[in-house]
């Protein structure tokens, strides 16, 4: 007797299950059926970005998306397929409201089923099968449609997968209740998809926890990859007669459906949570000229970023552009060593971001080196921990004051501070503190109001009181990080109190390190030019600063 798909799946080992599922993935089902959309077989030539998404059988996937990019359609087809072949306990499909459930079930779900005979036979053309607005029987399994506003609707039977369609509309209580529905499943799959709103909340919070996949357009002329979301608006170029998607290197036109375009993970080491960024910037059905026109004329910039670009947006002030930062570049190369006195700021993490500078006058300074440091090997092939590398850099640049963010690696930072007494301070922000920073030599810490510190370092950039080395990839990354923060007015819903806060709008590690370097300047003397010695001396330690630490080229 022939085994069912589910029985075949259960018969293979855990190591083989991913490969087995991949061989029977949704992509091959859609191609073999073929699935019909709007009266025609699904066109992969105009949806090339969906091929790898349909092949993805990861249990936990998040889609941070622009409107009308096919994500909901993909989920409907995937759910029907999984219920038929895989999930015995079915799927809970969550939509914002009860009214949305009715519209979604009748207009979207039923339309897909009615257009595809094979799905119609599984659901509607079966004797005694259940086919209501909120409950669909698919083979021996089920799809349940529920609104996310009511906790009553979430108290359903156990399921194998949950789909959060527009998770931005879901409360944390609703999410917690829904999560319990997969607690007894051996699968526990989750799909989250939504147009984003603000940073660090809703779908963007889940997107940031994942590996952050971006659709990279490869130039057929110079083979350079361009991330449209990161290069916007410079990625759209008005040629007079038309607007093109432009390569970030050579400026020639990019094809959104070029066969060598590819999904690339920003954080490839994250394997258990997959997240996709989906934008109309590379949709074959949206003209670049329409996007650029909307950008230049919209009165609702937040709605444009969210719905058209698929990017979170925060209405902020005091945001500096990358071009303003790059205008501070001179012709000097980054230095490999310096006699000092130098100051340094460190934003620690899996990778440590460093900004090293010198004071050139009472109010001015210059950056002489940027760095991204991780564990490495020295010239003798021995392992050197990243914190030890920072220690050697302090010596090499004669850093007289280094400020390191005290969190999250307080023990490692304090140990390094003990190795350099009086030179390293751990930074802790205080919302209630006003005025000057508080330096404590007793425990080598410095406290300051976080907003005031960012205000001060922003002024150094905006007023042109810092000089940058010659433009390079690392300097361009620094400029982007500086652009990725903005000052936002927030209001407490309970008390009505209002305050300004610096909001993270993307990767901002170098900006935070720069903030700490400016703070370190308070304890750093003004560098005085010394007469050059004719004697040449080689540094006693070799190290490298990494350029392009991100998974897609940095």
Image: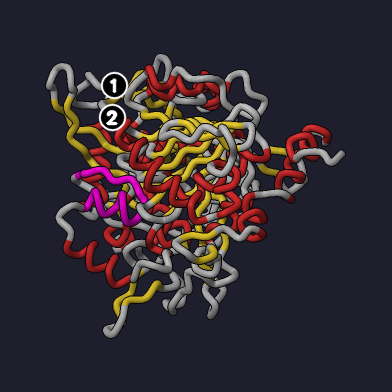
Sort mark 2 into few (<14), some (14-19) or many (20+) by Cα contacts within 10 Å: some
Residue occupying image coordinates x 43% and y 70%: 248
Where does the magenta region start and end? 301-316
Camera sees residue 211: yes
Sort mark 1 into few (<14), some (14-19) or many (20+) by Cα contacts within 10 Å: few
| 26 with respect to 228 (left or right) | right
Residue occupying image coordinates x 22% and y 19%: 432
| 220 with respect to 254 (left or right) | right
Is residue 94 or residue 354 the one in the foreground?
94
Q: Is residue 489 above or below residue 232?
A: above
Which residue has dot 2 on it? 450
Residue 424 picture location, percent across and down: 45, 29
Say whether residue 550 is magenta. Answer: no
CB atoms at circles 2 and 1 under 8 Å apart?
yes
Mark before the other along the chain sequence, 2 or 1 = 1
Residue 357 picture location, percent across and down: 39, 47
Q: How many marks?
A: 2
Secondary element type, mark 1: loop
Q: Residue furthest bottom?
A: 241
Is residue 383 or residue 298 the one in the foreground?
298
Marks 2 and 1, how far apart in space?
6 Å
Secondary element type, mark 2: helix
Marking on residue 430:
1
Q: Is residue 536 above or below residue 289?
A: above
Residue occupying image coordinates x 24% and y 48%: 302
Q: Where is residue 522, by image quadrant? A: top left
């Amino acid at each position: 007797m022939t085994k069912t798909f589910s029985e075949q799946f259960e018969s293979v080992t855990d190591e083989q299950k991913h490969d087995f599922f991949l061989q029977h993935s949704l992509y091959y089902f859609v191609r073999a059926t073929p699935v019909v959309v709007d009266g025609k077989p699904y066109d992969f030539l105009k949806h090339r970005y969906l091929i790898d998404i349909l092949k993805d059988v990861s249990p936990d996937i998040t889609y941070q998306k622009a409107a009308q990019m096919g994500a909901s359609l993909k989920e409907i087809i995937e759910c029907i397929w999984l219920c038929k072949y895989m999930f015995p306990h079915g799927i809970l499909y969550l939509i914002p409201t009860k009214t949305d459930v009715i519209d979604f079930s009748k207009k979207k779900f039923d339309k897909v089923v009615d257009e595809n005979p094979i799905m119609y036979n599984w659901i509607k053309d079966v004797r005694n099968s259940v086919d209501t607005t909120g409950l669909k029987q698919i083979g021996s399994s089920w799809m349940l449609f529920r609104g996310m506003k009511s906790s009553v609707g979430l108290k359903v039977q156990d399921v194998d997968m949950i789909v959060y369609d527009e998770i931005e509309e879901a409360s944390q209580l609703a999410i917690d209740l829904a999560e319990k529905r997969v607690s007894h499943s051996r699968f526990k799959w989750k799909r989250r998809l939504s147009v984003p709103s603000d940073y660090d909340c809703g779908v963007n919070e889940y997107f940031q926890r994942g590996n952050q996949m971006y659709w990279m357009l490869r130039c057929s002329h110079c083979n350079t990859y361009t991330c449209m979301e990161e290069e916007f608006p410079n990625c759209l170029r008005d040629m007079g007669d038309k607007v093109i998607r432009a390569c970030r290197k050579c400026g020639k036109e990019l094809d959104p459906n070029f066969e060598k375009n590819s999904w690339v993970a920003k954080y490839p080491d994250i394997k258990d949570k997959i997240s996709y960024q989906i934008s109309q910037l590379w949709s074959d059905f949206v003209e670049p000229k329409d996007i650029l026109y909307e950008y230049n004329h919209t009165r609702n910039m937040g709605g444009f970023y969210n719905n058209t670009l698929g990017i979170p947006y925060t209405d902020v002030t005091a945001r500096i552009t990358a071009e303003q930062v790059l205008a501070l570049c001179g012709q000097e190369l980054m230095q490999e060593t310096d006699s000092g006195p130098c100051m340094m700021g460190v934003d620690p993490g899996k990778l440590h971001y460093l900004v090293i500078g010198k004071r050139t006058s009472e109010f001015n300074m210059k950056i002489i080196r940027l760095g991204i440091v991780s564990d490495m090997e020295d010239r003798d092939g021995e392992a050197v921990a990243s914190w030890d590398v920072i220690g050697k850099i302090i010596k090499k640049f004669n850093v007289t004051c280094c400020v390191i963010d005290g969190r999250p690696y307080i023990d490692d930072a304090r140990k390094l501070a003990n190795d350099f007494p009086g030179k390293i301070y751990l930074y802790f922000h205080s919302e209630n503190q006003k005025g000057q920073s508080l330096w404590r030599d007793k425990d080598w810490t410095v406290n300051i109001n976080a907003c005031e510190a960012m205000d001060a370092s922003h002024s150094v950039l905006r007023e042109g009181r810092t000089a940058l080395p010659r433009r390079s990839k690392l300097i361009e990354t620094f400029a982007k990080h500086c652009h990725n923060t903005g000052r936002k007015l927030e209001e407490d819903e309970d008390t009505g109190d209002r305050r300004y806060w610096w909001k993270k709008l993307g990767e901002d590690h170098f900006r935070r390190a720069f903030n700490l370097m400016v703070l370190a300047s308070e304890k750093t003397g003004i560098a005085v030019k010394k007469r050059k010695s004719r004697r040449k001396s080689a540094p006693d330690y070799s190290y490298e600063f990494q350029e392009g630490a991100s998974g897609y080229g940095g």
